[in-house]
Image (tube, helix red, strand yellow):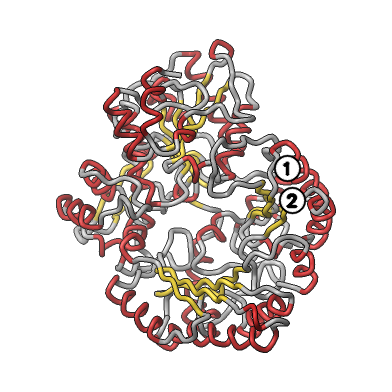
Amino acid sequence: MNRNLERILPRVQKPARYTGGEYNAVVKAKRSVEVRYALCFPDTYEIGMSNLGVRILYGVMNQVPWCWCERVFAPWGDMEQEMRQEGIPLYALESGDSIADFDLIGFSLGYEMAYTNVLNMLDLAGLPIRAEERYDLAPIVVAGGTCAFNPEPLAPFVDLFSLGEGEDVSVELLELYRRAKGEGWEKEEFLAEAAKIPGIYVPSLYDVTYHDDGTIAAITPREGAPEVVTKRIVQNFNDSYFPVKTIVPSTEIVHDRVMLEVFRGCIRGCRFCQAGYAYRPVRSRDPEKLIAQGIASCQDSGYQEMTLSSLSTSDYRHLERLCDGLIEWCEPNGVNLSLPSLRADNFSMGLMHRLQKGRKAGLTFAPEAGTQRLRDAINKNVTEEEILQSCRTAFSGGWSAVKLYFMLGLPTETDEDVLGIADLAEKVYQTWKESTPDPRRGVRITVSTAYFVPKAHTAFQWEPQITEEEYQRRVKLLRDHMRGRSIHYNWHEADTSMLEAVFARGDRRVADVIQRAWEKGAKFDAWTEYFSLERWLEAFAECGVDPAFYANRPRAKDEVLPWSRISTGVSTRFLWREREQCYKGVITPDCRKQCTGCGADKLYPGGKCDAE
């Protein structure tokens, strides 16, 4: 370890974030590798190490014998200050080497409020933040993750984006880079060849022009660049890589447990949900394979908790069979099995009895809207009676805590829909009174509301976000109508959600704002300790950019959207039809009841997904 590093670690919070050396971390001899990849997560160690995608890519790339993939996380403010004072550049945990010495630097982008950390990490490594100012073949800056489906706000900073699932495309990119490095290519030659790999978007190969009103006139590919870049998916998910031998952190992290990935994609089609559309088609793993992976992961890591991971775990066809197989091993070995947020329309008595064998943590349901009219408009496909029946099942089984998640500001929402949230919470309370076997224990019903953010590649990508003032009015309206000491109401602050809306649907002009805000001190914008709305408003003003243009403006059907050159496999025609169905109040059945013709099945072998 660097002596300067040894000196500063006792002066910072949680020094174990910065030391490396964890169990199962991969260390290779530098002389034995040809390509080095710095896998960066633009947030703290505790959050990054809780990300299953990071663990999967780490394992996949380290299986390549001539590649060494190392982890990098954003240092907290105290550590960053010490590093800058001591002249210590941002380094990878496995080797301690500066990431500026690596061949590729890859950022995992899971949420928009981490964008300034991308710039800060590049700067802390001593690298220019703008791609056009990094002239050499090394390092190439890569970005992927959910936010890459609208890459434009970060386009000036990133050399190339990897769209969709990274297991296969990452190895293909590594192989191309190995060849480029061996043959001494220039950076421009490498980027031109990388753009030929399906799923790779190179922003410098596309020119953007604008109308006088600020909307985009055209996004024009240069010679050799594809007209549309379509995301990649893992074709054989059942046999794809899973990190059974995963890194065991030396300090506590957010999700300190085995995360067992049950399936990818979602059958539901909620019209607001970017992940639900972007990760289609549905692909699942066999229950026997999942049971073996879960047991092996616990045995290797020593974890005493396992959770089933997916967008909608209770939609897994073999869930009860899977739970039975896992509980048979978990129960005698003292391992708790838990499920994330559940669908309120398929929480069964059988599932409840299986969960009872572990700890009775609180259950979480996400009705999203307070009235049936609005749930139909957003295609939630769940009824009030199904919600209450699920709560009745849980309460009769001895549960005494339920969390209910909603959104405010959804398209077509009225005050009646807002007040419907309070009415539904009261009905859940009455359901507890009628069905609990032990009323002396009491109940805690937690209602949480988020500020709706329209996202790219969804049926609501054309919709405006309501203004902050209107959001606050609706919060107050709901708060004033919440009744009962057993019902607790939490709401998301508006400031960060407004910025999220700007970034989620922004174009390349937003990049100047991100850079200016970073220059003024912005970083860790998802953390209240660091976030400053005033700083961001100053940056918008100094760059001559109106945030309302991106957040609060409806888009026309024929408007060229910043992500128009990106495809998730779901057709724009289908998304527009879903938007029209919202305003008609018409639901679209889930994929298992009827193929909706979204187009994503064409990405799958034989044109048929697991949902059918």
The residue lying toward the viewer, choosing from 63 and 13, is: 13
Residue at the spot 56% in from the left edge and 34% down from the top edge: 170
Whether tag 1 and tag 2 are in contact, CB under 8 A, the answer is yes
The residue lying toward the viewer, choosing from 461 and 219, is: 461
N-term mark: 1 or 2: 1
Residue kind at label 1, given as amino acid type: Cys
The answer to whether residue 195 shows anywhere in this view is no
The residue tagged 1 is 298
Q: Is residue 57 left or right of residue 394?
A: left
- Local SS, label 2: loop
Q: Residue furthest top?
A: 31
- Local SS, label 1: helix
- Residue 100 rendering spot, x and y as whole percentages: 38, 23
Residue at the spot 66% in from the left edge and 83% down from the top edge: 439
**1 or 2: mark nearer the eye:** 2
The residue lying toward the viewer, choosing from 327 and 220, is: 327
The residue tagged 2 is 335
- Residue 368 rendering spot, x and y as whole percentages: 52, 74
Residue kind at label 2, given as amino acid type: Val
